[in-house]
Image: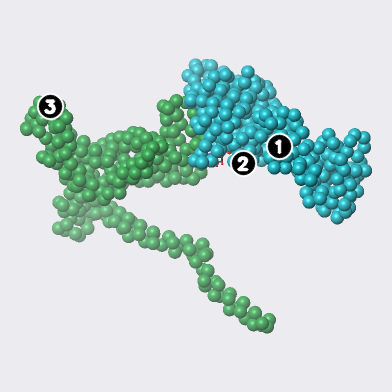
Amino acid sequence: MSASAGARVEAAAEPEARGRYWLDRENVLAPVLLLPAVIYIIALVGIPLVMAVLYSLSDVSVGDQSIDFVGLRNFQQALGDDIFRTALRNTFAFTIASQIIVLILANILALVLSADFRGKRLVRFLVLLPWTTPIALGVLGWLWTLDNVYSPIDYILRQVGLLGPGSPLGTSWYGTNAYWLAYPDRAQFSVLLVHVWRTLPLATVILLAGLTAIPQDVKDAANVDGAGFFRQVFSIRIPLLLPIMAVAVLYGIVFTFTDMTVVYILTRGGPTNATQVLASWAYFRGIEAGALAQGAAVALFLFPVLVGVAALMLRLARRAETV
Amino acid sequence: MAVVEVRDLSKRFDGVNAVDGIDLASTDGEFLVLLGPSGCGKTTLLRMIGGLEPPTEGDILIGGRVVTDLPPRARQIAMVFQSYALYPHMTVYNNIAFPLKAAKLPRAEQEKRVQWAAGILGIDGLLQRKPRQLSGGQRQRVALARALVREPTVFLLDEPLSNLDAQRRASARDELQGFQRRVGTTTIYVTHDQVEAMGMGDRIAVMDQGRIRQVGTPHEIYDDPADTFVATFLGSPPMNLVPADGGRELLGFRPEHFVPWKAAMGDEWIRFPYHVHRTEYLGAERLLYGEIGEASAVARFPANADIAVEIGSTSDFAVRRADLKRFHPETGLRLDRPGNGRRA
Ligand SMILES: Nc1ncnc2c1ncn2[C@@H]1O[C@H](COP(=O)(O)OP(=O)(O)OP(=O)(O)O)[C@@H](O)[C@H]1O
Ligand SMILES: [Mg+2]
């Protein structure tokens, strides 16, 4: 091959190489990869959020969709409303109570599941199942489980003598059913139960991952240093799990705080709004009653808490990076 | 009395004999080194003594008491791990105090002992730091302080210096040995580094494939190896092994005992024709690489020794008869060592 032919080949290869490898350049690749996420966030998070803020400051309704600004009137009305205050209280109560229970149960479960026993994988899989079920389906299952007449829980309680005329859980009506969803306190308990059932699996799996990440040497050292079981759990494992526990709880808070499915399907906020939460109340006001502006205002009360949680999560993530 | 004794101790991991029938006893206050190549079962043996691994067979005695079935915390031992295994969420003070808290000592006594241990190891100034704010050497000293603070019967150390760079390691070796001499606690020390073993051990137990090949002082191990494994595992370059007597035995000699025939004076010397094919200058010393017949052999001299050897030439070299060891060519066992046959 002659020298000039070689040079020609080289010259031809140059622009083609640049064309073929343009995706390898970070200043091209980064925007290309980020673009879908940015579009997604603007379309599905940014625009609805702006709309919600606009709506909450106006008098828009399903019947009259023209936006006339009315200042903070919707917020004032919401705050003056007894149902709203119940919903606000319930939202916090359900979230805090369920996450405390989940934290305790998840720690115990994770400790048990981290032990070596036959069928460990199967049990872990079963524990994770509730989390993989679509929430609406799961709650429908609970609706039946807590049914006023056919509840299998009632059946078991009757069999062991806890339910029935004159028994501890008996009621003044027939005494043969607990009516889980008919009394305010029992309905609240039921909603709490379903929230715990729903968020426990993920928390357990997160803690389990955290437990297995504790170096064997550290556990061995604690053993050799004379720590018994409880000292190992409370002085070594739980403190080392704290950061990841925070992650699990923050996830749980977001799930529970914003959830309307459980209340909507299980109790529809009842009886007499005793289990109403912000998300369900926003839906009932804004969509079912048609008062869009009111609904938006109610929903926006979720916002400050979620911003706080998000900030905490980001801080935890950053701490995890620097350690 | 033996402080730690193991009797016919074995550990099988699904088919692998990690430890294979070991008998070993350490005497009061001694620094006993377990030395062997990677995977020979040193860590497994140490973890069984510490109670972190249940033996498949055999017994472990500490202070004359059988502890085979006791958990680690009932054994009066302290362990230092290769990774140091400090508790990352606790301050140095709380790390050192942890064994005392577990033993439910009164707070004032805890503080006294932590100060004492920290003083011995020179880490008084670091007590409020977290482990991640310490250098490797400082972490090692915290781990030692945590081991010391309970005044255990035995220290078990698993390659505690392997995380340090070469320079730190030399000084840490020095510190560690000085520390052990001061507190006088019986120590079992695991390493695969022969320099560490030779330099620190009162006695060395050389292990291979789950068995102990020889136990003895560094001198005995180096000058009087029980078999060809020990002879070639220690020393760098290792002992030369040359077939003799029509292949019925192997003659072993250290490179530093292999000198030109002309330089051999007095005593009784054995002569070998030595073909040199390469020399290596290492600053303080010089190595010759070559063959005696088919077998390769290395000679070592101080760099300033006046040795004129031509590369590619064959000349006469010699070894003192007293420096020659005789080995069985198949079993590798020493033929000329009193007491061989009832090996440890
Ligand atoms: N938990 C285990 N399960 C299965 N095999 C194991 C286990 N622990 C050790 N072994 C095997 O037992 C043998 C001895 O391992 P051990 O860790 O005691 O070696 P070692 O002498 O400490 O090596 P090193 O110098 O590399 O640390 C190895 O073959 C190893 O693969
Ligand atoms: Mg090891």
- Residue drawn at point x = 61 percent, y = 79 percent: A9
The quadrant where residue B209 appears:
top right
Neighbor class of circle 1 (other Cα within 10 Å; few <14, some 14-19, many 20+) is many
The quadrant where residue B138 appears:
top right
Query: Where is mark 3, residue-wise?
Result: A167
Chain letter behind tag 1: B
Query: Where is mark 1, residue-wise?
Result: B333
Identify which residue, A151 or A321, lies in the foreground.
A151
Instruction: Check disc 2 and report its element: helix, strand or loop.
Output: loop
Query: Where is mark 2, residue-wise?
Result: B38
Circle nearer the N terminus (2, 1):
2
Cα–Cα gap, marks 2 and 3: 69 Å
Q: Is residue B125 left or right of residue A206?
A: right
User: Where is residue A202 shown, x and y percent of the image?
Assistant: 34, 43
User: Where is residue B267 shown, x and y percent of the image?
Assistant: 90, 34
Chain letter behind tag 3: A
The quadrant where residue B202 appears:
top right
Question: Is residue B268 shown to the viewer in this render?
Answer: yes
What colour denotes chain B?
Answer: cyan
Q: Is residue B310 left or right of residue A250?
A: right
- Residue drawn at point x = 44 percent, y = 40 percent: A212
Question: Is residue B191 shown to the viewer in this render?
Answer: no
Mark 2 CB within 8 Å of ligand 1: yes
What colour denotes chain A?
Answer: green
Identify which residue, A274 or A238, lies in the foreground.
A238
Kind of residue at badge 1: Leu
Instruction: Check disc 1 and report its element: helix, strand or loop.
Output: loop
Tags 2 and 1 on a common chain: yes
User: Where is residue A240 shown, x and y percent of the image?
Assistant: 45, 35
User: Where is residue B310 shown, x and y percent of the image?
Assistant: 89, 53
